[in-house]
Image: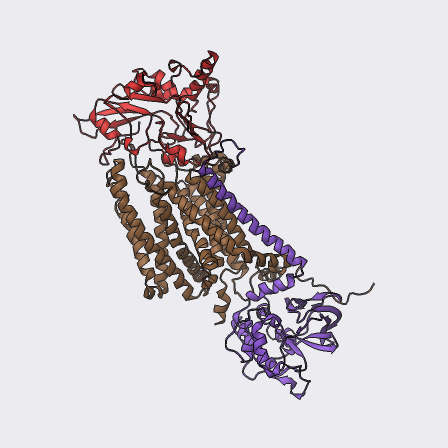
Amino acid sequence: MEQKNKARYGMVVDLDRCTGCGNCMMACAVENNLAPAEKKANDRTGITWMRVYAMNNGKAFPAAETVFVPMACQQCDKETPCIAVCPQNAVDRDPGSGIVGQVPQRCLGCRYCMTACPYHARYFNWSDPSWPAGMEKALNPDVAPRMRGVAEKCNFCHGRWHAARARAAAQGRSEPDPADYIPACVESCPSRAILFGNLDDAGSEVAKACQEGNCFRFLARLDTESKVYYRSAKPWVREMAEGNRMPSGKDGNLS
Amino acid sequence: MIEQTLPRLPVESAPAHTIRDWKAMEKKWIPRGLPRCSPGRFYAWLAPWLLLLAIGAYAMYLCFAEGLQHTNMDNRFAFGLWIYLDLTVIALGAGAFFTGFLFYILRWKEMTAVINAAVVLGFICYSSAIAILLVDIGQPLRAWFTFWHPNVHSMLTEVTFCLSCYLTVLAIEYLPVLLKNRKLRQVPLFLVFEYELHRVMPVLAGVGTFLSFFHQGSLGGLYGVLHGRPFAFREALGIWPTTFFLFILSAAAAGPSFVLLMARLTQFLSRKQLVRAEVFAQLGKVSGTLLLFYVLLKTLDTMLWINRIYPQTGFSPYSFYAEPSFGTWVLLLEIIGLGLVPALFLVNPRMREKPWVLTLMAFLACSGVAFNRFVMTVQTLALPTLPFDRFLRYVPSWQEVAAFLAVLAYGVLLYSFSFRYATLFPQERDLRNQ
Amino acid sequence: MFPWVYEFRWTTGHLLFLGIFFSVLLTIGLTVVRAAWKTYRDFQDQKQEHLSWKADFEDLSPLARSCRHEISGKVRRRSCPNEFDCRVCANHRVTAGRLPSAGPPARRGADAGFCGLDVPLDRLYHRGHTWVKEEREGVYLIGLDDFASRLIGPPDQVDLPAPGTRLQANGKGWRMRRQSTIVRILSPLDGEVIGQGGAQQGWYLKVRADSRGNKMDHLLRGEEVRSWVLRELERLQMALATDGVGMSLADGGELVYDVTLQDPHADWDSVLGEMFLQA
């Protein structure tokens, strides 16, 4: 059943390069047809597949430091928390790409997956998505908008993945060219902080980058084998990220 | 035309013309020899609950029509009051399966005094849990998808399957209680069917026990498998995390206590003795023994959790209890105040003899289980996982509270009707004659 | 769920889980279908009267369910395990076999009066307050005993089964209404109705009994009738006391005719139900 991956797509996000501009969030929302936030939505009810958080070292000036952490679905590889818990197989992991996908048409909105996800990368449609008049013309035809009452999350722009596969098929190849498949957030980052590619392809930039010493994963000790890596030259960032929580009370804010 | 010498009996089918006729007719539905208050008083007692039910129905309508934006749940606090309520009522509803198990399988004859009440309470608990779950999920019309393509590795699948099967079993168990109503039993078909159903009841009680074991466990497993949530995660024994077994045990312990508590409450409200003191003591004893066993295992589990899972996940042992509102007192209250204390009182025969001690301790035992479900649901979600997260707060919206109260009102209504028109406590008539 | 549904997998987990699920579903379904089928069979076999009585019997108060030999003082506490059908009772055969009173009914004598009630011993009595008297070979008259007549008083309505109707011992005999209270009278024997009487005739039904062996063994006779009447008076007193009827039968007091008239506001429904073995 579980066949070997043909590819294993992943990311390396350079936190030292991220300026926290939020362009990735914008590009993601446009690409994936995220409806504009409801009037009463807040940072806990709005839908942002990609979200930039701020993380600080909790120290007082002049030692205070802050990094911005763009966080989307971490595409966990091992015992993917959300896949195991979904009662009706509405979350799956594509063996061909390693991408964890969500089937909104099958989701019944129990939100158990959201409880299971330690990265809070899953979002729920608390109300009907709606677009201001005229804006529906700007919707991306490659991605189906989701309905009220279902969970959703980043899927590495599966519209682009399908488009890349279609183009590869048209050219007679079975697998898309890595250069031809780039998620919107990666493409839009002005400081080129995000690398994307096949982690199993030893020659790829992303596979090399994730092996480097200052690369780490968030909550690595929860053993989820996420495919989104981060890197930073600052030791405190790595230490905090890997799951050693600092004492409470001095933490950062949601951006 | 020959005059009919032997007239039929027109009385029963004659329409009621006056309030007095109606009252006399209503009285014929009440089991013989059981004094019940006047219909006026009865319906006056129902009125406030009906109002609550109506408000709750409106709140549920809002959620159905406009989505769950009417709740205060959010992407971070994805489970709220309703899931907590589900876990609690299902734990308390375990009284039905456990009393049935004692009565039909272990053949404890004295349980006949409360078996009907336990079945009705179980039916109320489970049906309200399913009703509130249907409001809670975002797409209620897709609820059957779980049956169509089940993910057999998900605890929620196990819960869904067992819950729906067990509600069916409870409905079948509830049916004889209704069919034995004084008026309905005059229909020979009903009475004979009731008799035949009663004969197969041990099979259903067995199935119910089996299903209850699984879904009580799976509800515990629901949190125990969350390896992304170190606060809830527990290591597995076989294929199930330890919470699976702890939930079974705590539900079995709380169930008899809840039956005891409700019977006492009914006695208090109706100002009648309904159940013999020995039966109460017996329920208390069962509850206390299981609770003691549970507290022991829970302590062991907590020790293992602190010493093995905490270090593995890189979370410091105190980080979970460092928040002002959820200090270590939570753990102490759950295990000692609402676990060990009632358990010790309930296993003591001298203490069990005092009715108020028995009632108070049964209340504490039920609160303990409710508190455990609260901690597993709310504290798990409130605690941060990412390093830049904060401790989260959640206050339910009025719609959530109204739906909660509506379920409570539904329970009170169904229970009141059952108490008035069916025989919930078979000993009531004998106790009256003494 | 099913092998033909997309995403079904032939893994151990699936087979185990779905296997258990379908077994449970099948068990529940079969159990209910079995109960329904047995119900159907019971009606086919005309057992509904017997089973209804069985169900009713379970809901009677413990005092009402006492064994006749407990009432007559032959045995210590014993609750009837056979729904008053002594014909199938092994205990009865043993206990009654030892007794001298198991002979044919005595003749009607001058001693018919007992506690102010007319209790002739030339007939057999049923626990539901009917008597059975042989009119001629195989044909019996069934009537209400004095105790019952005094309790109900003049009935406002009597609903007798039509001739040809089959009666079953302990099954429904006929129904009587007094004011708003309806009483179901149990049939004392198995047989076919061949005639209808009434309160004026002194008997209610004429029945051709089924010719089966020891068919009258379940009926009270001889000396035990008196201890039973005493017990019934005791039960009545208790029912009157608990149901808040503002009167009681003082020791030595007699049961007046038409008790119902004495206190129209009392819970006669409950009292009569208790005395006529209704659930």
Q: Quadrant of residue A97?
A: top left
Q: Colour of chain C?
A: purple
Q: Is residue C165 left or right of residue B351?
A: right
Residue B280 percent across, percent down from the top left? 41, 62
Residue A215 percent across, percent down from the top left? 26, 23
Q: Is residue A251 left or right of residue C59?
A: left
The residue most toward the top is A171
Tell me, yes or no, if residue B107 can be seen here.
yes
The residue most toward the bottom is C110
Q: Quadrant of residue A161?
A: top left
Residue B67 percent across, percent down from the top left? 46, 34
Tell me, yes or no, if residue B15 can be seen here.
no
Quadrant of the image for the N terminus of chain B? bottom right
Which chain is depicted brown?
B
Q: Quadrant of residue B237?
A: top left
Residue occupying the point 63% across, 82% down: C222
Residue B187 percent across, percent down from the top left? 63, 58
Q: Is residue C62 left or right of residue B301?
A: right
Vertical relation: A62 (above or below) B282: above
The residue most toward the right is B1
Which chain is depicted red?
A
Q: How many marks?
A: 0
Residue occupying the point 41% across, 40% down: B155
Front residue of C279/B273: it is C279
Residue occupying the point 38% across, 21% down: A7
- Color theme of the render: by chain
Residue occupying the point 54% across, 73% down: C66
Vertical relation: A47 (above or below) B295: above
